[in-house]
Amino acid sequence: MNPLNPNDAAASDPMPQAAQAAPEVDATEPAPNPAAPRAQREPAVLTLPDWKGAAASHWLTHWEQQHGLRRVNQHDWQRPLRGDWMMQLQEAVLTHERCHLLAHGLAAHLVDAWLRHTQQACRVLSVVLVDPIDLNDAETREVLFTWKPMTPQAWGVPTAVLWKERNPSPALSACLNAWGVQPLGTGEPVGGGVVGGWAHLPEYWGEHEGAAQSAEAGHTW
């Protein structure tokens, strides 16, 4: 039985059929890394790019290649369907006993939708949102009109936000504050390059991995 509710997606956002061939993805796919691949990090960090994807030169692609993070792909980065992307995330999470989610831009809303419907949230040690976008913004709403804005309801998973290139709108700030989202660093934008913000992440992940290990060690079975 699939633990994800298949009736979640709106009629305008159908689940993909297995028989459909996925369209080719061009610049949104990272180029092969000529260097020897890094060992994949454990517990896994699953990355979710923004709605236009992350090309070979993107900071997220560099983080994946340099630090062993694992991208959750989906079928069309230019016209992302929430139901399709949720299924890809569900399948990725199910392959790991424990993982962290690193969600950029629109992917924050994808994580919001997934956590409200999945039965696998217990596998997620933490979530880091990077530059989440405000779907109430007029320009964004015009392009991504099938997506629903996040609501101020906590997920029950430790969550932090890293601002690299954006400043939050008042509505988005209120939503994040209602969840008790922890800002990484000073809360000010750290810059969009490969270096900006990375130093905060291993410490944050390690903190929650340690907490999970302590909880498991103290549990009486």
Image: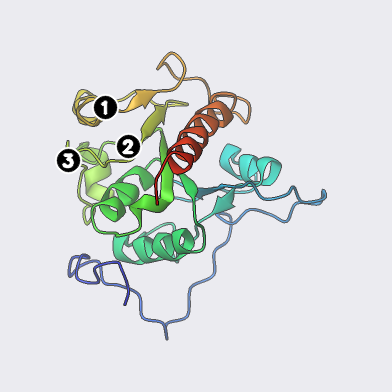
> Label 3's element?
loop
**SS under mark 1:** loop
Judged by depth in the image, the label closer to the viewer, 1 or 3, is 1
Q: Is residue 190 left or right of residue 156?
A: right
Closer mark to the observer between disc 2 and disc 1: 1
Residue 178 to residue 86: above or below:
above
Q: Does the image show residue 137?
A: yes
Residue closest to the far bottom = 19
Circle 3 packing at 10 Å, graded few (<14), some (14-19), many (20+), is some
Specify the amino acid type for callout 3: Thr
Which residue occupies the foreground of this view, 62 or 122? 122
- Residue 52, percent from left and from top: 45, 50
Look at 25% across and 66% down and name the residue there. Answer: 13
Q: Which residue has dot 3 on it?
A: 151
The foreground one among 197 and 180 is: 180
Report, in whole angstroms, how far the alpha carbon at label 1 lies from the one at label 3.
13 Å
* Image quarter of residue 195: top right
Disc 1 and disc 3 in contact, CB within 8 angstroms:
no
Q: How many marks?
A: 3
Going from N to C along the chain, the mark reached first, 2 or 3, is: 2
Residue 158 location (% of width, % of height): 36, 35
Q: Residue at x 43, y 13 (%)?
A: 186
Residues at marks 2 and 3, CA–CA distance in whole angstroms: 13 Å
Amino acid identity at mark 1: Gly
Tell me, for residue 133, which label it has, or none.
Answer: 2
For marks 1 and 3, the one nearer the N-term is: 3
Residue farthest toward the top in the current orientation of the protein:
186
